[in-house]
Amino acid sequence: MRILLTGGAGYIGSHVALVLLEAGHDVLVLDDFSNSSREAIERVEELTGRSIDTIECDLADQAASSAALRDEAFDAVIHLAGLKAVGESVAQPSRYYRTNLVSTLNLLDIMAEHGVTKLVFSSSATVYSPAAEGVLNLDESQPSGTGITNPYGWTKAMNEQIIRDVQTGRPELEAVLLRYFNPVGAHPSGRIGEDPAGIPNNLMPFVTQVAIGRRDHLAVFGDQYPTHDGTGVRDYIHVMDLAEGHLAALDGLRPGVEAYNLGTGDGQSVLDIVKAFSAASGQEVRYEVVAPRPGDVARAVADPAKANRELGWRATRTIEDACRDSWAWQSQNPNGYAGR
Ligand code: UFG
């Protein structure tokens, strides 16, 4: 298939592009490069020996995106483009709602104009409502779309609802909502990886930047949670496993809308990650415990059984693999991609 991949130059998008090309698909990337790099695309081309067609365009600009895609043919869409920083979304809610919602609306219109029915959407574990007491691992039947603590998370939940409503009006639409847990790691070559602009918001890029000496120490956000060591527990999934989940989702599309968790089913604490990363990299990661970050939960771990059962997908890489590959990326590219 020829697949339109929005946000294909970003961290997750570049790994998805690579996996699609290696599976024999053709890839058309649409990206505005506001938080991504052309170099990522070039490196995926190098790694795969295949070329990627690229359109620079802001999907939230209806006229521009519809014109840019007018003469393009594609069989399916993987929609990753969007703003994704939780804290920034609290400070700039209008920008987040406008960008993330309007992009999806425009894309759904473009798909209808082109008669394209296949859609894989990048959603997030953040759409789940706060877990009831006693619920350890979240499955897709858990309530979602209430009690979300930031506009970024709301845009993911609202986009899920938009896709469901559009599918009701266009029953031939085949959509999968992929609820990512915490993506980490990099391609094992160390050629592509996560290159956040400015100070990293997320744990793994912060840890790798401490290890390479770009940051003095990690601030651990709270150590009094009801977890095995008091620090927050998450389900860290290797980005290559996550990327392969998109391929499985494409193969599993059928009319309707289905949500799937992409996670490992295992929980790791912040201190577990610090230890695993130090062991994998041989670098000390200095840290200091500070106050909890507002909006954080103690634990968010997937039940990935549905994706395993229905898509035939499961995460196979370990946290040690993820730490080794993150370090390969960070140590070979201490300042990320050039020109960032
Ligand atoms: N953490 C620290 N110090 C840091 C950064 C993070 O201690 O400098 C801790 C957090 O408190 C949390 C864990 O590391 O316990 C993971 O934090 P991240 O910011 O890496 O990830 P979150 O789980 O907060 O958020 C991620 C994605 C969101 C997504 C959410 C869904 O970044 O986009 O998962 O659960 F919405």
Image (tube, helix red, strand yellow):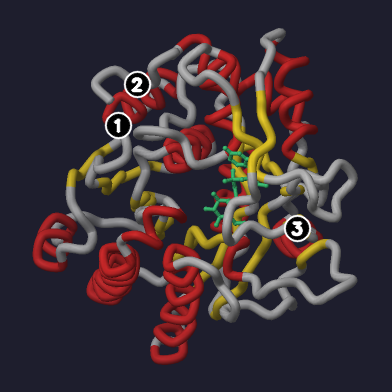
Task: Tell me if 194 is positioned left or right of 66 in this view.
Answer: right
Marks 3,2: beta carbons within 8 A: no
Type of amino acid under label 3: Ala
Q: Which residue reaches farthest front?
A: 291
Secondary structure of the residue carrying tag 2 is loop
| Label 1 residue near ligand 1, CB within 8 Å | no
Return the residue at label 2: 337
Residue 237 tag number: none
Q: CA distance from mark 1 to mark 2?
A: 7 Å
- Dot 3 crowding, Cα within 10 Å, few <14, some 14–19, many 20+: many
Whole-percent x and y of residue 216? Answer: 53, 18
N-terminal-most mark, 3 or 1 = 1
Query: Looking at this view, is 94 or 174 the one in front?
Result: 94
Q: CA distance from mark 3 to mark 1?
A: 30 Å
Q: CA distance from mark 3 to mark 2?
A: 31 Å
Return the residue at label 1: 37
Query: Looking at this view, is 13 or 218 the one in front?
Result: 218
Say if 209 sits above or below 84 in the image: above
Type of amino acid under label 2: Tyr
Q: Is residue 132 visible?
A: yes
Return the residue at label 3: 302
| Label 2 residue near ligand 1, CB within 8 Å | no
Type of amino acid under label 1: Ser
Which quadrant would the C terminus be assigned to in this image? top left
Marks 1,2: beta carbons within 8 A: yes
Secondary structure of the residue carrying tag 3 is strand
Q: Is residue 20 visible?
A: no
Whole-percent x and y of residue 108? Answer: 32, 73
Q: Residue at x 30, y 31 (%)?
A: 37
